């Protein structure tokens, strides 16, 4: 029980008053930004990145993890009461949760989602505790060639599998990779793509790109679609205490959602959207009252909410053990590691045991805090939903600007921020996913580094990526992930040509 | 789950023809970007020591990928684009966009001249206006409060020093009794 012992040490770290304070700040802030439309964990953590110059790494990561988990809890509140998903991973929750709220069962919907999130978050964190050391053992065998292939797999899955279009996802990814290449090449000292602008020699700060896309771009997009008149907030009705029947109908979906969410999150594909959708359709299929789906079935809230939180926990496994971020938030966290000079990867569990296990322990504590924050104190968050959109978005822009300007106090950075914001608007308008830009920007330079190391070790032999068994296996998986959906579609249309392709939910 | 709709597969939007202007511009942008990446990659000097896997391999790969994707996007744009009908029919609210953009531009112009507080107020008022708010005085006051919260609660705790202007120095003197350097 090596992991268990390490975890106990982690609790000793996480339970110090100062770290408990960071955890509380993180979970509270996370819930708040999860509730507020237009603000997400990636943006918030990006704005808080300068904190890494001030506080020690353990405290910073406890804060960031609290924000990450908290946003998942808070997002469901918005989905249920406002029918506007606060987070992309809570879209499915809005389907049934909002219907439940409309029929006066908001309390039960909020309760099943908060308790389900707690169950899934706790099991998911247990999953990290026991899976991470296994992955570490396995990852220690990886060479640069294997890492490069693994990153290719992550590139393929985050773009081809998650988004609505592989081409647009890839285009966003390549753009991010290019942004990541700007600046001085660390191996040769050559300046790349700086266009003679000295400010670009250090590269483009990920804060600027994340804030530009997620705050400025998003605000512009919402402004272009915003119609005056407020969204209808459904008043909080119904007891927060679930009835016996509601418990009976919730606990199995929680566990099934967790079982779907954690493994999918932990795979290099990552992302929370897919498991939530899978969980929704699974619950619909298994339900004894399928006719309730679409009219407020509690299973349709319980399952996806659990899947969403379990996958959030799962995403941390490749991030911590392989240094492989598979969501925008994880990519920003990785850049926080970089700013401390820490390289996430298998060695992290040896060299930074206190940090890693303190962080994992804080996730358990954070889940308890979030349950308290999101059930007894739900009224507070409902009040936040009443902030009028003009003030909310104006505030987001002011915060984004001050947060970015504060890093270097250079107007060049602000111009860059707004240019990227304009681009983010175009991407949103023309249905390009924005998260791959951040992932490409962080992962691109790492992929290049591993590629060059692999080629140096192999003395310039390109076949190294296909002859190493680990690398070859991963490349085959990447190819399957890229071609799989297409082949599946062909197969389907071949087998049943007259059937309409899927429901348009 | 629904009544069987025979023949037309749902995934295939009804056959569109003609060029989609917006998407065409986006695809063109991707192609231009690919060309710029390629051109700038040739500008990177390569020492013969690193000839095999030098600093240009990844940029070449990026330029190639971007170009390929640009072509695919272009093909799609020429065939009527990829946006859904519903998306196509919504026209963006240009006036709202202009207000927000004006706020951003004024903010860049003002921030190094007058300090961030005044620049933030202007940004706040313009953005709120873009979202339909008409209460300029109220918005300006809230904007000031926001800027100060961001300044004291955020910049000060994170230890990043934001260029102070007239309003900041005044408040700093009132609250802390000294002017920051």
Image: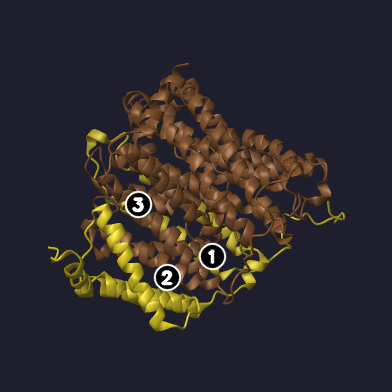
User: Which chain's colour is brown?
Assistant: A
Give me the chain letter of mark 1: A
Q: Is residue A143 above or below residue A284?
A: above
Q: CA distance from mark 2 to mark 3?
A: 19 Å
Chain for mark 3? A
Depth-wise, is mark 1 or mark 3 nearer the camera?
3
The residue wearing badge 1 is A429
Closer to the camera in the image, A163 or B107: B107
Query: Residue A464: x, y in percent?
Result: 42, 25
- Kindly identify which residue carries mark 3: A48
Q: For residue B181, which quarter of the picture?
A: bottom left
Q: Position of residue B4 (x, y in %)?
A: 87, 54
Q: Could you classify mark 3 by the number of other residues whose Cα lies within 10 Å: few (under 14), some (14-19), or many (20 or more)?
A: some
Q: Nearer the viewer, residue A495 or A28?
A: A28
Disc 2 or 3, which lies upstream in sequence? 3
- As helix, strand or loop, the secondary structure at mark 1 comes to helix
A218 versus B54 height, above or below: below
Per the model, the C-alpha gap separating discs 1 and 3 is: 28 Å
Q: Is residue A177 left or right of residue A405?
A: right
Residue A311 shown left or right of residue A450 in the figure: right
The residue indicated by pointer 2 is A394
Mark with earlier residue (1, 3): 3
* Frontmost residue, A214 versus B40: A214
Q: Residue furthest top?
A: A1
Quadrant of res A420: bottom left
A36 or B69, nearer to the observer: A36
Chain B colour is yellow
Tell me where residue A123 sits by quadrant. top right
> Which of the marked residues, 2 or 1, is nearer the chain's N terminus?
2
Badges 2 and 3, same chain: yes
Q: Chain of mark 2?
A: A
């Amino acid at each position: 029980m090596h992991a268990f012992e390490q975890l106990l040490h982690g609790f000793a770290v996480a339970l110090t008053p100062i770290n408990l304070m960071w955890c509380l700040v993180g979970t509270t802030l996370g819930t708040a930004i999860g509730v507020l439309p237009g603000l997400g964990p990636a943006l918030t953590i990006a704005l808080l990145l300068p904190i890494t110059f001030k506080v020690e790494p353990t405290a910073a990561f406890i804060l960031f993890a609290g924000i990450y988990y908290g946003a998942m809890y808070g997002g469901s509140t918005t989905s249920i009461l406002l029918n506007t998903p606060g987070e992309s991973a809570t879209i499915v929750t809005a389907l049934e949760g909002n219907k439940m709220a409309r029929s006066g069962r908001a309390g039960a919907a909020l309760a099943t989602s908060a308790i389900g999130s707690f169950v899934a978050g706790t099991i998911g964190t247990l999953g990290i505790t026991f899976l991470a050391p296994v992955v570490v053992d396995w990852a220690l065998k990886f060479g640069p060639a294997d890492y490069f292939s693994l990153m290719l797999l992550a590139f393929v899955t985050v773009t081809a599998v998650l988004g609505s279009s592989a081409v647009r996802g890839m285009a966003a990814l390549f753009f991010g990779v290019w942004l990541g290449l700007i600046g001085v090449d660390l191996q040769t000292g050559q300046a790349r793509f700086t266009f003679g602008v000295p400010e670009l020699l250090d590269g483009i700060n990920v804060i600027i790109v994340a804030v530009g896309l997620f705050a400025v771009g998003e605000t512009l997009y919402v402004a272009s679609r915003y119609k005056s008149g407020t969204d209808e907030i459904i008043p909080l009705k119904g007891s927060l205490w679930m009835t016996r029947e509601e418990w009976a109908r919730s606990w199995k979906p929680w566990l099934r959602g967790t079982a779907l969410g954690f493994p999918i999150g932990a795979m290099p594909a990552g992302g929370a959207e897919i498991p939530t959708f899978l969980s929704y359709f699974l619950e619909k299929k298994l339900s004894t009252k399928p006719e309730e789906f679409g009219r407020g079935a509690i299973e349709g809230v319980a399952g996806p909410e659990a899947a969403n939180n379990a996958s959030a926990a799962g995403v941390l496994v490749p991030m911590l053990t392989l240094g492989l971020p598979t969501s925008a938030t994880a990519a920003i966290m990785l850049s926080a590691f970089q700013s401390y000079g820490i390289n996430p990867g298998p060695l992290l569990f040896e060299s930074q045991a206190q940090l890693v296990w303190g962080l994992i322990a804080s996730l358990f504590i954070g889940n308890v805090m979030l349950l308290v924050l999101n059930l007894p104190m739900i009224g507070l968050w409902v009040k936040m939903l009443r902030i009028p959109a003009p003030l909310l978005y104006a505030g987001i822009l002011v915060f984004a600007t001050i947060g970015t300007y504060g890093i270097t106090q250079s107007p060049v950075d602000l111009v860059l921020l707004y240019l990227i914001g304009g681009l983010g608007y175009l991407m949103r308008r023309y249905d390009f996913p924005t998260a791959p830009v951040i992932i490409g920007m962080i992962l691109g330079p790492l992929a290049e580094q591993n590629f060059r190391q692999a080629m140096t070790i192999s003395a310039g032999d390109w076949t190294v990526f296909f002859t190493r068994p680990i690398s070859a296996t991963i490349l085959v998986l990447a190819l399957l992930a890229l071609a799989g959906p297409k082949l599946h579609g062909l197969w389907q249309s071949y087998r049943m040509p007259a059937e309409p392709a899927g429901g348009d939910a | 789950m629904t009544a069987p709709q025979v023949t037309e597969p749902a995934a295939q939007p009804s056959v569109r023809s003609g060029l989609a202007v917006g998407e065409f511009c986006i695809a063109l942008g991707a192609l231009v970007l690919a060309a710029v990446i390629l051109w700038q990659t040739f500008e990177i000097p390569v020492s013969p020591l690193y000839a095999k896997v030098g600093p240009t391999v990844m940029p070449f790969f990026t330029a190639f990928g971007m170009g390929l994707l640009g072509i695919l996007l272009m093909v799609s744009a020429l065939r009527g684009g990829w946006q859904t009908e519903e998306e196509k029919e919504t026209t963006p609210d240009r006036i709202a966009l202009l207000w927000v953009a004006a706020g951003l531009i004024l903010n860049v112009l003002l921030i190094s001249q007058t300090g961030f507080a005044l620049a933030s107020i202007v940004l706040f008022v313009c953005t709120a206006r873009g979202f339909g708010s008409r209460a300029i005085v109220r918005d300006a006051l809230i904007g000031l409060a926001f800027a100060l919260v961001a300044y004291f609660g955020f910049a000060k705790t994170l230890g990043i020093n934001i260029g102070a202007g007239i309003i900041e120095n005044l408040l700093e003197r009132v609250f802390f009794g000294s002017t920051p350097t």
